[in-house]
Amino acid sequence: MADPTTHVPPTMQALTFAGKQAIELSTVPTPKVIHPTDVLVKVHLAGICGSDLHPFHEREKGIAKGCVTGHEFVGTIVAAGSRVSKLAVGDRVMCPFTANCGECTFCARGFTCRCSHTQARLFGWVSDAELGLPAEARVGLQGAQAEYVRVPLADSTLAKIPEGVSDEEGVLLGDILSTAFFCAENGGVGPGCEVAVVGCGPVGLLAIMAAQHLGASKVWAVDGIPARLAMASSLGAHALDFTQCDPAAAIREATGGLGVDVALEVVGAQSALRVAFDALRPTGTLSSVGVHTYESFPWTPVEVYDKNLTFRAGRCPARRYMEKLAPVVAQKTRDWARIITHRLPLSEGVRGYELFDKKLDGCIKVVLQC
């Protein structure tokens, strides 16, 4: 197959992992189409995600130094392999955080995040063992906090951004907005539900809006950071500062001692899971999308049994939710992108990580203009 990427520069700027709590702006080789089902995307916007902080802090280990980071992005296709049939050069596209084949058992069931294809991997994770291999021999995928990104299985992974959806909204659809709705729907949020959202980072704030969109009658929002609590309040949630009160006790008191119907945990910490558990009424549902790195739960099987608890957790099938939610976003009934507080050029991406990680300058969500 002829190289279709000869018109793009041989090198590009990208953010790369440089060790614990270290991100660098690097000059790296521009990726190329390798497989006939690949495309090359010129990135317009890339997000910094809370789950990017897990390898950043080495709570998750194994990512290679020099790996291009990031998995939230939108852009324009600039090259396509010979077997790409549903997309074309010039298409403006959004992408979930994992590639998927669209054909395996899990994709057929709508769980594209669990695709079994060998190329269906998370963007922004090349392992230590793979980094030295030729690109065509790797399984892991380089990330999208860069000027260009290679997308495998493009026809089933990417989606065209419809009219009425902005680049910023497309970035949100590819991960955190989809994750917020997945969390709320997994919890069974519907008309009249009383809901607690534990964690008011980007996903948590979008989960508040998702719960309201699905008909929740009242939403409590738990966090300890004033800027996040202020935004939660501005969205119409009842904000509870866990540094000032016992949020689960406050929720039970406000609900006549019962607790909420649904608790949405979006932090990825045992303390957050415990607050969510304690805020639930008997027969309630705890829906968790926080990326957990612990080996146990902060409750016992006896406690779960005694509460008739339903617990649901897991990774969002973002590819399915992207297309499901794009018409909702296009209606402009809510300002989903209001959670984006910082817009920086890629050249300031290292600063973007610092702002996001340390929650400086009221930072809630960072997008990078690539």
Image (spheres, rainbow, N blue to C red):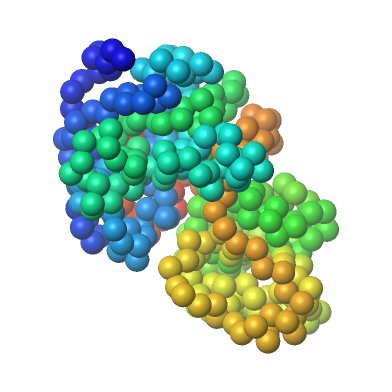
Residue shown at 65%/83% (left/top)?
A: 301
Where on the picture, by quarter, is residue 71? top left
Q: Up-down: is 2 above or below 366?
A: above
* Above or below 21: residue 130: above
Answer with left or right where residue 200 lies relative to residue 20: right
Residue 13 as seen in the image, left or right of residue 369: left
Q: Residue 224 at x, y = what percent?
A: 49, 70
The extreme bottom residue here reads 302
Q: Position of residue 74 (x, y in %)?
A: 44, 31
Q: Going by the image, does 155 lie left or right of 121?
A: right
Task: Tell me, yes or no, if residue 41 can be seen here.
Answer: no
Count of labels shown?
0
The C terminus is located in which quarter? Answer: top left
Residue drawn where x is 23% and y is 52% of the image: 129
Q: In which quarter of the image is the N terminus?
A: top left
Q: Residue at left 18%, top 23%?
A: 10
Residue sitting at x 57%, y 58%: 314
Q: Who is closer to the viewer here, 192 or 295?
A: 295
Quadrant hosting residue 231: bottom right
Q: Which of 172 and 334 is in front in this view?
A: 172
Whole-percent x, y for residue 235 in the image? 63, 52
Query: Residue 363's x, y, as percent?
Result: 40, 53
